[in-house]
Image (cartoon, grey):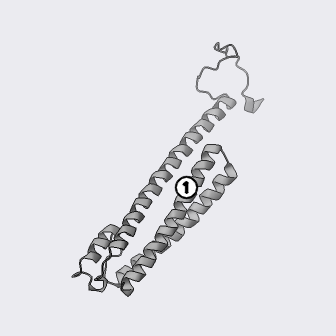
Amino acid sequence: MSEHLQTLSAFLSAELDLLNLVQDSIEQEHEALLKNQIEKLERATESKARTVDRYQQQQLLRSEWMAALGFAADLPLLELMRDLADSEKSPEFRTDSSDLEDVARSLNELALSCDSKNRRNGRLILRLQEKTRNTLNVLRGEDNGKDLYSDSGEKAPSTGSRSLGKA
């Protein structure tokens, strides 16, 4: 394997390792959300943010290295791998780079998976916020005309009393 391919391999491996850590943090975050474990959620969220920063720094290093070799710094990774396979465009990468293409595909799939799982967590957070907001509104007496029910399942009469927050 050429020196350039070894360097690229090291960059991609580092990115893959970091993205796996991001995914682990996202999963820990999800578990904490489901179990209402606030301290664990805070730790997972902080870990995710730190690891995403490290991942982005690693991507930047690879992009700068590729730009120094004459490739567009903002070239998507899979497109870069196709360019590398074209020996006329990149003679310094003439050896077979199919292993690196597999790593690049894995990296792309993992990034999409992380994005999807992170969005799932975001939707869960929004649902939990809405549930909390609705509960607080009831406790404050700001239930926007929602009917409350007694122990017997009957509509509770409005007493016009003060809200729990003002009692």
Q: Residue 80, how many percent across, how many down?
A: 31, 72
Q: Residue 155, how many percent across, how many down?
A: 63, 14
Query: Looking at the rendering, in which quadrant would you find the C terminus?
Result: top right
User: Does 145 sit above or below residue 84?
Assistant: above
Residue bearing mark 1: 26
Tally of marks: 1
**Rendered residue at 67%/15% (across/down):** 156
Give whichever of 161, 72 is nearer the camera.
72
Q: Pick out the residue farthest to the left.
A: 88
**Rendered residue at 56%/62% (across/down):** 49
- Local crowd at mark 1 within 10 Å, few (<14), some, or many (≥20)? many
Give whichever of 110, 164 is nearer the camera.
110
Side (left or right) of 4 relative to 147: left
Side (left or right) of 136 relative to 11: right
Q: Does residue 74 show up?
A: no
User: Does 134 sit above or below residue 108?
Assistant: above
User: Does 164 sit above or below residue 84?
Assistant: above
**Rendered residue at 49%/51% (across/down):** 117
Q: In the structure shown, which secondary structural element does the residue marked by tag 1 occupy?
A: helix
User: Does 124 sit above or below residue 2?
Assistant: above
Q: Residue 1, how many percent across, how many down?
A: 36, 84
**What residue type is disc 1 on?**
Ile
Give whichever of 130, 81 is nearer the camera.
81
**Rendered residue at 42%/82% (across/down):** 7
Q: Residue 130, how many percent across, how many down?
A: 57, 38
Q: Pick out the residue farthest to the right.
A: 167
